[in-house]
Amino acid sequence: MSTKHPVIAITGSSGAGTTTVMTSFVNIFRRENIDAFVVEGDAFHRYDRVEMREKMKENEAKGNRNFSHFGPEANLFRELEDLFRTYGKNGTGRVRKYLHDAGEAAPYEQQPGTFTPWEEVPLGSDLLFYEGLHGCVADGDIDVSRYADLRVGVVPIVNLEWIQKLHRDQNMRGYTPEAVTDTILRRMPDYISHICPQFSRTQVNFQRVPTVDTSNPFVARDIPKADESFLVIRFADPKNIDFPYLLSMLHDSFMSRPNNIVVPGGKMGLAMELIFTPMILQLMDRKRRAG
């Protein structure tokens, strides 16, 4: 953790909604005039798109049907830990970008699904903001979470997560239901071992819970809307949280436990900005005091 160079880590599974969280934080950064250096978790995958397909085939041929982007073998956990540690120490570190599609790849004159070369984080940013799968991951002697000053988990209940993935991969990426189901099954051991434990290392968790039937996610016709869900927000340390203020600002919300507030799903963005604006301003105040 760092006073002069704070690190914020947003962690969540594929399709969990971390992009929505990122939008809320970007709004805070813009409003408070904070220069955040943004890092996408996909940049720390070990293999590009073509290489990953080959590695999956190799592992399947060896009888390993659980090789996935969720686990350590397919990621650069050491390099991610080094980035958080180095940035916290001196405000820099090694990063790259993963080019998801043709639009992202065109300026670099590269193919989609490839990485840009490694480069140094420019000096002068106010904080580092990470969003991806492994912002709080730990594996052996590696513990990425210990170098993050603000750790946030985004965790829809698992049936909802599967519905979102099924619809996204079929409608936007052209996969068959069988192919998406196979991916879910292949990832499950790494999901249990390397994704779920992160949410015990976060300071705040956001879990979306639908209020409609999601008993069989594999036949769901649509994704439950925000207004058809509640958002359960859990604080690891609630003593400095102004719950009366949050309850007054987030209408129809209520406390379910001393460290849990339940909010209508449609107010997720507002809840995030109300909760994280004072936390980020506190990080910036500590940074200024440290000189």
Image (cartoon, helix red, strand yellow):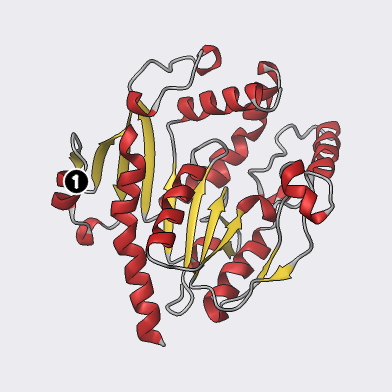
Residue in view at x 19 percent, y 46 percent: 249
282 horizontally vs 258: left or right: right
Residue 102 in view (yes/no): yes
191 horizontally vs 214: left or right: right
Q: Toward the viewer: 200 or 272?
A: 272
User: Looking at the rendering, which quadrant does residue 65 occupy?
Assistant: top right
Name the residue that disc number 1 marks. 249
Q: Label 1: few (<14), some or many (≥20) within 10 Å?
A: few
Looking at the figure, which quarter contains the C terminus?
A: bottom left
Residue 275, placed above or below residue 247: below
Marks counted in the figure total 1
Residue 181, placed above or below residue 236: above
Secondary element type, mark 1: helix
Residue 201 in view (yes/no): no
Residue in view at x 30 percent, y 46 percent: 271
Residue 161 percent across, percent down from the top left: 50, 30
Residue 286, placed above or below residue 187: below
Residue 93, placed above or below residue 274: below
6 horizontally vs 247: left or right: right
* Three-letter code for the amino acid on which mark 1 is drawn: Met
Residue in view at x 43 percent, y 31 percent: 157
Residue 80 percent across, percent down from the top left: 63, 62
Residue in view at x 31 percent, y 44 percent: 233
User: Looking at the rendering, which quadrant does residue 265 occupy?
Assistant: top left
95 horizontally vs 19: left or right: right
Q: Toward the viewer: 106 or 123?
A: 106
Residue 204 percent across, percent down from the top left: 36, 52
